[in-house]
Image (spheres, helix red, strand yellow):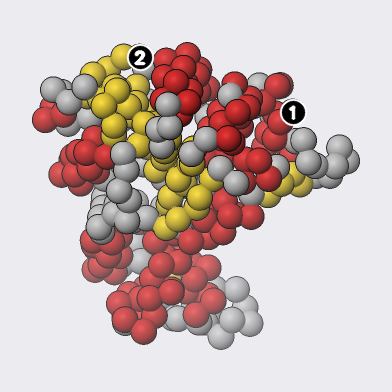
Amino acid sequence: MTMIPLTFDKGQGLAGPMTCDEQSFRAIAKLLRDETGIHLPGDNTSLVVSRLIKHLRRLKLADFPAYVRWISDPAHVDDRNLMMTALTTNTTHFYREGYHFDIFVNVLLPRLRTAAQDGARIRLWSAGCSSGEEAYSLAATLIHHWPDAVQHDVKILATDISAECLETAERAEYPRERLEPVPDPIRTLMLSEGSPDASTVRMPKILRDLVTVRYLNFVTPWPTRGPFQAVLCRNVAIYMDDETQSRVFTGLADLLSPGGLLFIGHSERLPPTLSHRLTLIDRTTFRHN
């Protein structure tokens, strides 16, 4: 394991070089895997150092062994959760993988409208929503193509493991330039309650009312009942080991309604055990049989 020397800024009371030793790395990797299912390969010492050094500085801890002792203490669960957030990749943007939204509109939405008009309960899930861009992209797409959705029992659940990301999703405020990838008519809807000169945009109330933001950790019992007519779980399981991925995708399949759609990331693969339950109908899009 490569030892990476670091030096604290002067004035922190922690002068001198610092290294992330192999034992500390293994302890951090085990905590991450046990609590999130994410596998951290042994060549990621530099990532651990770069993402956690600010927390060592904040806590005024002299080295990584001290940090491991700190986060292992049950009294410091908040700092352990901050570590999980720091080591979790929270890459997202509005209208990411736009073809998924096209498939949603063309394949699923007509059936949702018919079912809702017959009194059905419509539930959609952004699983691993990060800071909420995916959930609000789905909400805006839904309202643009089906304005009457608000007159029916339609909700979007947005979940993530990062408390910091969930706070952003709950506020629903984003820099205006983040909306540039969104198609014009849908972006207009997202901007409908904002000032044209504002650099920050808050999602309009009609979208916020559709989205429910909740904490969810895939390796603990899920507080969800379903069924869901669509689940977007994209690039969430990619860093998990095969066993954890299988449990996650199997759990999602269990919560999909018949004919419901599961959208996954372009680098992800479903386990063979689900081949009889989920059928590929388009790019990284599966229908529940």
Indicate which label's residue lies in the foreground, 1 or 2.
Answer: 1
Residue 260 versus residue 153 in the image, above or below: above
Farthest residue in the right direction? Answer: 197
Residue 42 screen position, x and y as percent: 26, 52
Q: Quadrant of the C terminus?
A: top left
Residue 178 vertical placement versus 165 (above, below): above
Residue shown at the point (63%, 82%) measured from the top left: 11
**Do callouts 1 and 2 mark residues in contact (Cβ within 8 Å)?**
no
Give the number of the disc on residue 188.
1
The residue that mark 2 highlights is: 282
Sequence-wise first label, 1 or 2: 1
Mark 2 lies on a secondary structure that is strand
Q: Is residue 108 left or right of residue 278?
A: right
> Residue 160: where, in percent of width, then height?
43, 52
Q: Nearer the viewer, residue 175 or 123?
A: 123
In the rendered image of this protein, does residue 109 appear above or below residue 13? above
The x and y percentages for residue 142 are 56, 28
The reply, left or right, for residue 62 in relation to residue 260 is right
The percent position of residue 198, horizontal first and vertical second, equals: 84, 44
Q: For numbered disc 1, what is the local secondary structure?
A: helix
Q: Nearer the viewer, residue 180 or 47?
A: 180
Looking at the picture, which amino acid does disc 1 mark?
Thr
Total marks in image = 2
* Viewer-nearest residue: 73 or 211: 211
Quadrant where the N terminus sits is: bottom left
